[in-house]
Every structure is written in structure tokens, then in C-alpha cells.
Image: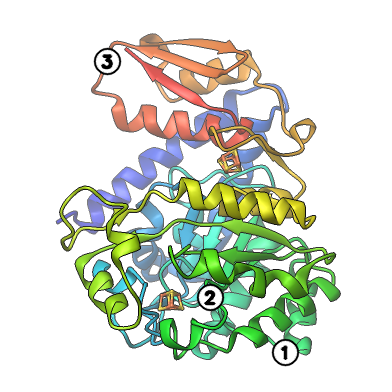
Amino acid sequence: MIHYRDKKYEFHSMLLILNRIINYINWMDLIRRYFDIKEKVLRNLGYTIGEKGIEHALMDGHHRRRPRACGLTVHTGVGCPIGCLYCYIYDMGFPSGFKRYPLNVDELLYAVISNPYFVPGREGTLLAMGSVTEPFIPKARELTFTFISRMRELVNNPVQISTKYILDTDDIKALYDLDPELSILVSIVAYGSSSVLEPSAPPVEKRIGFLLNLAREGFYPSLFLRPIIPGITDHEFMDITSELVGRDIGIVLGGLRITLRIINNLSRVMDVDMIKSRISSKIDNRQKYIDLSDLKSNIKRRLLDMGFNVYPAACSANIISHKLGCRICKWGPCGDLDNISDPNYSAIKELAQFMNIDDYIDIHIHRGGITLVTNRSIFRDKLEIYRNILKTIYKIPVYLKK
Ligand code: SF4
Ligand code: SF4
């Protein structure tokens, strides 16, 4: 178990590195701006939450987890009572009840912003809420709204929410006032079959109405067609989308993960052979991704014909809602690449010097991204942080090579 004092020491070493960055970089570069902001915001938040609050934040998972493809996931609750039959969170140990997240909003912000991988700012780390809980469930709503508002005010990172819950028009207006660029994904996987697959979720017709209402009030929301369930979603997506044609609403296609528990659940209400035939390994308690590439391309083709903008992943919708650009992965490019900065060799080099890894890496900027060549493995953690910072800021692939 990591002792709090060790965590605190690690954290202060990181702050020392950040301070050196702030003090020594002499030009007003992107990197300098990012770390300058980070240090100031944490100092102010630290005054507000005090020693005890800092202790809570530094012990929290938001402080240490590495961003995933969709960005850094943020949770305002623990567990979900909706119990969709295809949901994987119960296999990850999350409960079927719901508890508000144990940190207050400023502690949660401190935990996120102090994460060594977190780059503050509009072009910084993408944040994704709703991956393992329902952020608009009434008990979580206040924390979710306040987090969005404070995040916008303090560092303005792009935030995305995925939800099945419906907000009324007053709440939508209030949310728009807090963050008009917020990327909102409304999850729908089935039309006629929804009542058996997700019996406790709000009715599909209401979720479709919610999407229309979000667009009417000024957001650029997306339908989150996730998970695509073979034999269901590919038959029902036309019913889901027919009312959305011609509206300012994007569509994100998402994958399906299964475990033995999920297959057993689904087998009570549908024929699961179409899912099982897509997986060659043994189905057990570990989450396995199902290959849906053929279904996804068919669905995508039909949706494009109907005039929809179809996005390959949730992060893509977040990038577009915030009018940014990204070409990190093979699914891109996404958004407008003119809205991202070109890599600056001097700034990249300087950052390596301040992180004390400069002697061990060669930096190559090329058309495909940035390659860092190193023969040292002992700096792996630092290198990963460095690599993530560059990837986040420039939104291009950053490769590590020996
Ligand atoms: S609403 Fe989302 S988190 Fe809750 S059970 Fe359904 S899929 Fe899982
Ligand atoms: S290129 Fe698109 S899909 Fe890939 S990480 Fe960037 S935003 Fe996401």
C-alpha cells in the first residue's frame, strides 16, 4: 500500500519539476502556459480544501489513472441502479446501487488536475464522464453540474458526458449556461427491444426527445449507438434515428464487451448465437471485445446516406463539439486540424530537459507524428507522462522506440 506521505513526496517532486518548467522556459509557448495554469490552479484549490482535502484528492484514483483513448474518465458516483443487461460495470466490481462520489467538487477537481498526465486547457486532456456510472442520476446531478461549471471556470478542458437520463428544458438551459460546448452523448442501443434489454432506463422515445431538445437549446449532441448488439441494434437503428434526420445531431458508433455474466443475461431475452459466433476464445469472467467491424460499416454507410455525421469514437464527438482537431489514431483525423498547434522542437526539447530525460532520448518530428528514441527503460513512467503530454497538446501520435 502506498503511504500518503510517499504520495505527497511524489506529488511535491512533480510540482518541483513543474516549477522548474515554469521558471526556465523563456518563451510563451503552449507547454509553459499549460504548466503555469496547472500550478496556479492547484495552489488556489489547495487553499480551499486544506491539508485534509489534499490528502483525500491525492489518494483518489482520479489523481493517478492514465487517460484512455476517450480522455481521462471522471466519476461523480459509484455504481448504477439501472442494470442494463449488457452493462460491464458489474463485472468490474461496481455495485448495483448508487452512491454519490466520496470527494467534494474541489477535492475531485484537485485530484483530476494534479494527475501527472493531466494537461490543463482547451487543447488539453479530454475529460469523459459517464463511463462507469450515470452522471445525471438525481443523486449525482448536483456534483456533475458543479464539476462541469468549475472545470470550465478553472481550466476549461473539453468535457463530455454520456447518459441515458433525461434533463428537462430548464436543466438543459442551465447546463448550456455552464458550458455551451459540452459534448453530450445520449446512449440508445435498441428501439423495440429496449424495454427488455434495459427495463429500468428512461424510455427510448424520451431519450430521442431529449436529444432533439439538446440540439434545440444550442448544444451539438450525439446519439451514442453503444453497445452495438448483433441481431438487435443492426435491425433497430433505423427506428432510433428516423426522427433525428436533418437535425444538428451526430452519431457515435460504439463497441460491445462481453463476459460470461453478460452472455447469460442476454440469453434470457435474445438469441446470443450471433454474438458468440463473433468470438473465438473462451467466454469467461474477463471482458472481451466483440469484432463488429462489418456491422459498423453497414450501419455507418446507411447513416451517411441519410445525411448524418458519423463518428468513430466518443473522443471524436468531444473534439468536434469543442471545434478542435485530432489525428492521434487510425480512426481519425477528426475535427479541424487547423485548430491544433504544430509541434515545436525547441519546446519539446526543453520539456525533456526539465523532466531530466533529455540525455536519454532523441526526438524526431515527422509527418506521421513524433518519435522518441530511447535505450533506457528505467525512466518508463516519466517517459510515459512526457509522451502523453506531447500527444495531448499536439493531438498527434507519439511513438516510443528503442
Ligand atoms: S445506465 Fe449505463 S452504467 Fe447504468 S447499467 Fe446501463 S449501461 Fe451500465
Ligand atoms: S483521431 Fe479521432 S478517434 Fe482517434 S483519438 Fe483523435 S479524436 Fe479520437
Q: How many C-alpha atoms fall within 10 Å of the one at disc 3: few (<14), some, or many (≥20)?
A: few
Secondary structure category for the residue under label 1: loop
Q: Is residue 4 above or below residue 361?
A: below
Q: Position of residue 16 (x, y in %)?
A: 44, 36
Q: Nearer the viewer, residue 52 or 126?
A: 126
Q: Nearer the viewer, residue 75 or 227?
A: 227
Q: Which mark is residue 190?
A: 2
Instruction: Choose the circle earlier in sequence order: 3 or 1.
Output: 1
Label 3 vs label 2: CA separation? 50 Å
Label 3 vs label 1: CA separation? 55 Å
Q: Amino acid at mark 3?
A: Arg
| Quarter the N terminus occupies | bottom left
Q: Is residue 382 above or below residue 103?
A: above
Label 1 vs label 2: CA separation? 23 Å
Asked whether the beta carbons under mark 1 and mark 2 sit within 8 Å of each other, the answer is no
Secondary structure category for the residue under label 2: loop
Lateral position of residue 47 relative to residue 90, left or right: right
User: Would residue 47 be visible to someone looking at this image?
Assistant: no
Q: Nearer the viewer, mark 3 or mark 1?
A: 1
Instruction: Choose the circle earlier in sequence order: 3 or 2.
Output: 2
Secondary structure category for the residue under label 3: loop
Q: Nearer the viewer, mark 3 or mark 2?
A: 2
| Quarter the C terminus occupies | top left
Q: Amino acid at mark 1?
A: Asp
Q: Position of residue 178 (x, y in %)?
A: 74, 71
Q: Amino acid at mark 2?
A: Ala
Q: Which mark is residue 376?
A: 3
Q: Position of residue 271 (x, y in %)?
A: 33, 73
Q: Is residue 122 above or below residue 345?
A: below
